[in-house]
Amino acid sequence: MKTRTLFPALFVVLSVFLVAGCGGGHDSGGSGDPAAVVPASTPVFIEFSLRPDGETKQNIDSLAQRIAGVDNVGNLIISELENSASADGEEFDYEKEVEPWLGEQGGLFMQEYEDDDFEGYGAAIQTTDEDAARDFIDKQVEAEDEEVKDGSHEGVDFKVEEDETTFGVFDGLVVMAENEAIFKQMVDAANGENLSGKDDYTSAVANVPDDSAADVFVDIGGLVKESGEEIDSDTRLFLDTAGIEPEEATAVASLVPGSDQVEIELSTNLSGENPPSGDASELLGSLPGTSVGAFAAAEFGKRFNEGIDQIDKEGIPGEIPPNQLKKGLKSAGIDLESIAGSIGDVGVYVTGNSERTLGGALVMETDDASQAKNTVSNLGLFLRSANIPGVTEISGKASGFSIRDAELGPQPVVIVAKGSRIAVGYGRASALAAFQESGKTLADLPAYKDAVSVLGSTPMTAFVSGAPALRLADALIPAGDEDFEEAEEFLRKIDYVAVGSEASDGLATAKLIVGVK
């Protein structure tokens, strides 16, 4: 008989239901919590639904139909697995062998991070019937040609394959580990300290969406420790400036399927004690409707000023002594506090469908028109007094100046003010598009409206229009790139990509939405 490895037959086959949406969706009779067998020091843990049902299953099937033309991806996967086993002269009947004992949740953890890769893993899936699960395992063992070793630890029996893969059933879970040592650690975790009892984990996952199909917990501080790498002085200065302590940080990403979009929700305390807040969605929606992509940040001037204050206080090691940065710039005619104090929300947009037509601009909002005009005027005077070549004054409905240099390409960098806005664009047309009084804005686009609806109360901070972005990528990526050509079929299905974010009480939350045609 052909060797039949247990891992693909048991865990890979079952874990695929995370995206398949298979199973009848009955209530699990098993009380096992996958996180309860995960060592407390684990830096990465993924928990997923094995048997999504109701609206979640309908959404998964809807996405599969839109993307791949498959009406029921779960049934398709089961059929393919059973047919593959039959072609190899083996028997595999999901309904009889797995369905009776399969629970609802599964988990997978990565143990150590070393040399830019993870070493050591373990997995657990809930079972509603431990005896039936053991019978399934015994059948797999009997079907294998290789020798399987029996073992026991703290009253838990297990089996070890020749490649050291170890598996067993306990505490309402079917458990597998990369090797015997990790399996024993999982048994010890169940009887002692484990991830489910760790405050960092429980607080991080407390607010994951109810309709999430999978959640990924990352102990950022644990990863920094596992990597064994020290944070360099420049990075540490930046983190301190932002009030960020990576050693104490965690993050959770949740996958939420919709009928015509996929959502990834991320929450983290990495953004420090005072995470960026505010709502710049009005500025974002007012940017040109011809934009391939756009981004907006609220209260940029305030954040910029806070960062400058911190850097000025600390200095830059080996370059600028403490309390000398702002003083030195003022002596050169640059008042950073005044400039930052005049700036509110900031946005960026990109336009064009080829390298030749590529353009875009940075847009800054100020409190009033006089602030905008004075800021641009003072900056232009400074550049001219510093004898910067290629500076030319611009007047008209928008006033400012342009900088032309061969190294900047065929178009000048244009800095202009109109009303309470300042625009810094590559090319005059790109810059002036920030002040358009006619024509569509992003907020007028149907895809943008759909994204706003999906994000709900979360302010949108970034938007990418699917078809224009694909045209630009097609023009910029060299012909014959196999990876792009393989991905292009699926990229054509993307209607838009949107990001929304908000923050409160030291916690930052972001939502990434991918709309599917």
Image: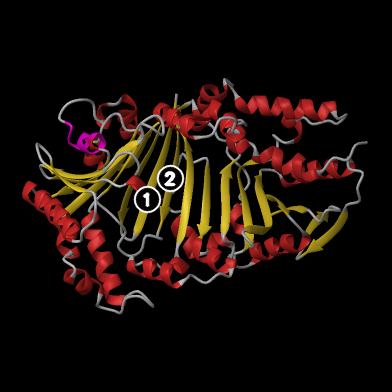
Q: Earlier in the sequence, mark 2 or mark 1?
A: 2
Q: Which residues are magenta?
A: 429-436
Q: How is the image coloured?
A: secondary structure
Report if the CB atoms under discs 2 and 1 are less than 8 Å apart.
Answer: yes
Question: Can residue 286 be spotted in the picture?
Answer: no
**Left or right of residue 143: residue 60:** left
Secondary element at image label 1: strand
- Is 341 in front, or is 432? 432
Dot label at residue 202: none
- Name which quarter of the figure residue 497 lies in: top left
Whole-angstrom CA distance, mark 2 to mark 1, is: 7 Å
Based on the displayed image, in which of its 4 quarters is residue 437 positioned? top left
Please name whichever residue, 508 or 349, is drawn nearer the observer in this view of the structure.
Answer: 349
In reply to whether residue 432 is colored magenta, the answer given is: yes
- Residue 421 versus residue 508 in the image, above or below: above
Question: At 86% from the left edge and 57% from the top edge, which residue is drawn?
Answer: 150
**Which residue in the protein does label 1 denote?**
509
Considering depth in this image, is 61 or 516 the residue closer to the camera? 516
Which residue in the protein does label 2 denote?
265
